[in-house]
Image (cartoon, rainbow, N blue to C red):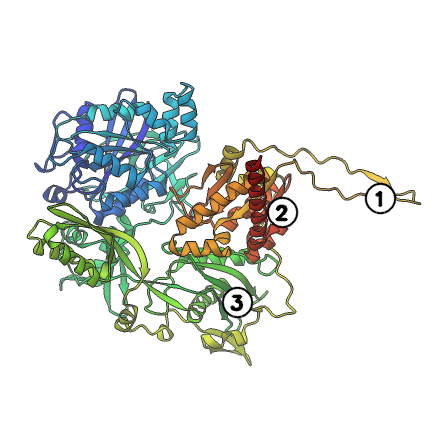
């Protein structure tokens, strides 16, 4: 039987749980329909959920239908519990996104859509509540296409096939030849090129059976490997206190009494029991196969996001709390006991980030909002038997830098030695931290480099303005030095931490604050008050959409200003207004000076995060302040090397024995290239060398072998590098980066058409969909959007290394380091400005030919 995991997601109050009930009822797996308002729904099994009428914890239900076994995973709809939803997305084969027919696409709907795109989850849409007044089918479909994707297609329309064909060129070609098949549609859905939409009312079972049949017809079970693999997506506890590890098998089989191992924790434990849950009941089984979703007991080392067996660990979550609270304990409970109990909850919800603040002597944790706060109070009391209160929540700020700096850390007390040089570079907003090495092996052994990277990853590094976590930057290991006799692992930990802090002290730091994206609907008579409020809160908004009765404002504002605004809206609109918001991300703090002064952080007094270094003099270690370190460091600066310093060798990929090896390290790259350019031809064994006799000599002389190009010229263009190097595009980008990008695409389409080359335009992680690279074909050129945490130069480095073996390859960039790498790979470099002249010459030639043809 095919096994398919389907998650159901929605903005709160869209009818998600009602649809889950209806699907189970229509499939014959439920004899009686429960209702949220009657507090008897099948999947809302916890008392708190039934009291509040909302889903708080994700649950599963096994839903056999014909020859398919669906596992339905119900997720929370309230924004405060969206981290639980994100964890569940890691194990889904498909998602059902429920849209309210009366409210359409709402703020949290957009957040969920971005998450689905990031994790690459194919999606079906069910527009619910179509039986209610105000539900407008055509209006909602228009919203779906405009705000989510043009590929949202109504699957119960007479023009369904024609609309499907318009979603993709390959589908259109098949449709025009009457060759469009069901398998083509299944493939397009799986690749997220098509999003089926259906309409109905879950409460009245209208359209539900048809939707269930649509899921059956147009879903396919993924292919799984034979080796054991599993992804952990949730940690829980049953009524008897047994720890439950919820996971999905993504390969092989799992049997009771088998040993699960963790390379990360060096742990190995036996599986005592395998449970397949449906609601709050479970069936104990002896084994499960790939595709199954289950819970196991007996394993204590697992954490949400862990990969087991052949499965990789999950990436860090996108959604994170923006408020931190202090825990106020009752007198009879000591902090040590409470901390141990709260750590149990942190294992179930890692985003709580429970910690002990030594300076304030209090337990702190992080939450998404007030509703989660109230739920947590109740959970603590019911599970652990004591009541807690929480202090007023504080905003979680972050810090980044504006300029590129070098950070130097040196640690040399007696009989110890380590020096580390890092490059700290600002990155795009909300891109997080990216850590890598560009240090040569002959400068520092790989083992030491790996150790330094481990120390960079293991710690939450804090900024120098407020002591808040740093983000939106690259930290690159450039050089380092060890001593043959005196260096120990802990020495590099000290040097690494100090290098980060010394770099931050040297940089121009920027304070960031969380920003809400909001939708505010108020009676038109209150519109002026609403606009004034948003401006007062340092927010911004789009022009209002108004009718005679109501007006809608959409925009952004700081969380610190808007967190209590929902209550104000209810009061001044007398209950008629609606305020919805979701976290958009982080941006420059609107009142940075005020916040910095209020926090009063002294970077140089922070003994847990020293920015100075320790050098050895006269047989003893002595401290050196951060601003004096460069005068004492032992290695030359990587930003300002001395004039007589040797030129740094380009950073190369590791050596490979054949061209197969380079793609074996990146199967995703191989897949994209073969999908775009066809199968890559393997190089034949090298022909024996030919020799010729030198004049007046009996000895054969070697002749240098010229590159054997296959006739295809490749031009690789670093998109954003060119945009900011060409003045007219740079000016355009200041008003619209999208406009500048589209202008460059149009220019290069003309250039490629004239030159007849294979042109690949690479944009640096601009259009991230589910953390996968994407390739689009536009008028003869290939446009690559790199995956998250992969820069354009990293991608170009890999591609130029491969293609230059058999083709003439030119790379357009003005990045100095990238140019060196390109030369090392055997490709030709072209500066962005030189390429501009080449493009202009091509445009002039095209104009000349057009003019000549016009005269004929």
The x, y position of residue 607, in whole percent, is 37, 72
Q: Secondary structure at mark 3?
A: strand
CB-based contact (under 8 Å), mark 3 and mark 1? no
CB-based contact (under 8 Å), mark 1 and mark 2? no
The mark lying in front, picked from 3 and 2, is 2
Instruction: Give the vertical position of 415 relative to 458 (above or below).
Output: below
Give the residue pinned by disc 2: 827
The mark lying in front, picked from 1 and 2, is 2
Give the residue pinned by disc 3: 418
The x, y position of residue 315, in whole percent, is 38, 47
Looking at this rendering, what residue extends furthest in the right direction?
696
Q: Secondary structure at mark 2?
A: loop
All told, the count of numbered labels is 3
In the picture, the disc for residue 701 is 1
Q: Secondary structure at mark 1?
A: strand
Looking at this rendering, what residue extends furthest in the bottom direction?
618
Instruction: Give the vertical position of 35 relative to 716 (above or below).
Output: above
How crowded is the residue under tag 1: few (<14 C-alpha within 10 Å), some, or many (20+)? few
In the picture, the disc for residue 424 is none
Which quadrant: the N terminus? top left
Q: CA distance from mark 1 to mark 2?
A: 28 Å
């Amino acid at each position: 039987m095919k096994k398919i995991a389907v998650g159901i997601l929605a903005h709160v109050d869209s009818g998600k749980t009602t649809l889950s009930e209806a699907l189970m009822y229509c499939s014959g797996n439920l004899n009686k329909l429960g209702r949220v308002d009657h507090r008897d729904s099948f999947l809302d099994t916890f008392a708190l959920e039934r009291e509040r009428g909302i889903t708080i914890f994700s649950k599963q239900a096994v839903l056999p239908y014909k020859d398919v076994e669906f596992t339905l995973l119900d997720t929370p709809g309230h924004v405060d519990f969206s981290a639980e939803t994100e964890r569940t997305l890691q194990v889904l084969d498909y998602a059902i996104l429920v849209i309210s027919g009366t409210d359409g696409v709402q703020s949290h709907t957009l957040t969920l859509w971005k998450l689905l795109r990031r994790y690459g989850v194919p999606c079906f849409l069910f527009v619910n509540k179509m039986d209610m007044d105000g539900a407008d089918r055509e209006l909602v479909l228009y919203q779906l296409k405009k705000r989510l994707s043009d590929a949202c297609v109504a699957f119960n329309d007479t023009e369904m096939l024609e609309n499907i064909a318009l979603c993709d060129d390959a589908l259109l070609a098949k449709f025009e030849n009457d060759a469009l098949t069901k398998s083509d549609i299944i493939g397009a859905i799986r690749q997220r090129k098509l999003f089926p939409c259906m309409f109905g009312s879950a409460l009245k079972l209208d359209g539900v059976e048809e939707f269930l049949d649509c899921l059956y017809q147009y879903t396919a079970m993924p292919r799984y490997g034979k080796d054991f693999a599993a992804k952990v997506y949730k940690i829980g506890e049953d009524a008897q206190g047994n720890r439950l590890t919820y996971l999905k098998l993504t390969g092989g089989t799992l049997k009771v009494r088998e040993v699960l191992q963790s390379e990360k924790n060096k742990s190995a434990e036996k599986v005592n029991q395998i449970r397949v849950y449906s609601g709050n009941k479970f069936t104990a089984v002896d084994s499960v196969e790939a595709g199954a979703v289950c819970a196991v007991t007996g394993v204590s080392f697992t954490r949400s996001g862990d990969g087991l067996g052949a499965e990789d660990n999950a990436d860090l979550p996108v959604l994170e709390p923006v408020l931190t609270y202090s825990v106020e304990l009752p007198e009879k409970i000591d902090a040590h006991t409470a901390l141990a109990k709260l750590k149990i909850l942190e294992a179930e919800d890692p985003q709580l980030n429970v910690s002990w603040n030594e300076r304030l002597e209090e337990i702190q944790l992080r939450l998404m909002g007030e509703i989660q706060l109230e739920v947590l109070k109740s959970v603590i009391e019911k599970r652990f038997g004591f009541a807690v209160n929480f202090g007023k929540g504080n905003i979680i700020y972050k810090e980044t830098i504006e300029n590129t700096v070098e950070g130097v850390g040196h640690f040399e007390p007696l009989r110890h030695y380590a020096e580390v040089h890092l490059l700290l570079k600002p990155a795009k907003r909300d891109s997080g931290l990216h850590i890598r090495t560009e240090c040569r092996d002959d400068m520092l052994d790989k083992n030491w480099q790996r150790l330094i990277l481990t120390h960079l990853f293991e710690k939450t590094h804090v900024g120098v303005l407020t002591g808040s976590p740093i983000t939106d930057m690259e930290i690159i290991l450039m050089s380092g030095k060890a001593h043959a006799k005196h260096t120990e692992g802990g020495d590099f930990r000290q040097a690494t931490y100090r290098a980060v802090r010394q770099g931050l002290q040297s940089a121009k730091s920027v304070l960031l604050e969380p920003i809400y994206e909001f939708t505010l609907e108020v009676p038109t008579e209150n519109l002026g008050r609403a606009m004034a409020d948003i401006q007062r809160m340092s927010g911004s908004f789009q022009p209002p959409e108004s009718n005679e009765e109501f007006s809608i404002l959409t925009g952004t504002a700081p969380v610190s200003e808007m967190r209590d605004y929902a209550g104000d809206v209810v009061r001044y609109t007398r209950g008629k207004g609606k305020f919805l918001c979701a976290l958009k991300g982080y941006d420059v703090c609107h009142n940075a000076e005020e916040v910095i002064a209020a926090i009063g952080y002294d970077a140089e007094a922070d003994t847990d995060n020293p920015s100075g270094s320790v050098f050895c003099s006269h047989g003893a270690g002595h401290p050196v302040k951060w601003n004096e370190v460069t005068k004492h460091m032992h290695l030359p600066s990587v930003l300002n090397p001395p004039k007589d310093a040797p030129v740094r060798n380009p950073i190369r990929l590791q050596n490979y024995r054949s061209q197969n090896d380079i793609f074996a390290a990146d199967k995703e790259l191989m897949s994209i290239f073969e999908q775009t350019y066809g199968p890559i031809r393997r190089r034949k064994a090298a022909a024996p060398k030919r020799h010729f006799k030198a004049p007046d000599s009996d000895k054969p002389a070697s002749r240098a072998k010229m590159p054997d190009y296959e006739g295809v010229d490749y031009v690789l263009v670093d998109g954003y590098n060119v945009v900011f190097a060409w003045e007219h595009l740079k000016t355009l980008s200041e008003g619209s980066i999208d406009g500048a990008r589209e202008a460059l695409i149009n220019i290069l389409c003309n250039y490629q058409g004239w030159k007849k080359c294979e042109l690949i335009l690479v944009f640096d992680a601009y259009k991230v969909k589910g953390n996968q690279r994407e390739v689009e074909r536009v008028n003869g050129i290939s446009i690559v959007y790199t995956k998250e945490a992969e820069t354009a130069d990293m991608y170009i480095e890999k591609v130029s290394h491969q293609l230059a073996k058999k083709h003439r390859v030119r790379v357009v960039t003005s990045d100095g380091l990238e140019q060196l790498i390109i030369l090392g790979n055997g490709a030709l470099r072209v500066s962005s400005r030189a390429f501009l002249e080449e493009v202009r010459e091509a445009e002039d030639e095209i104009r000349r030919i057009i003019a000549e043809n016009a005269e004929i």
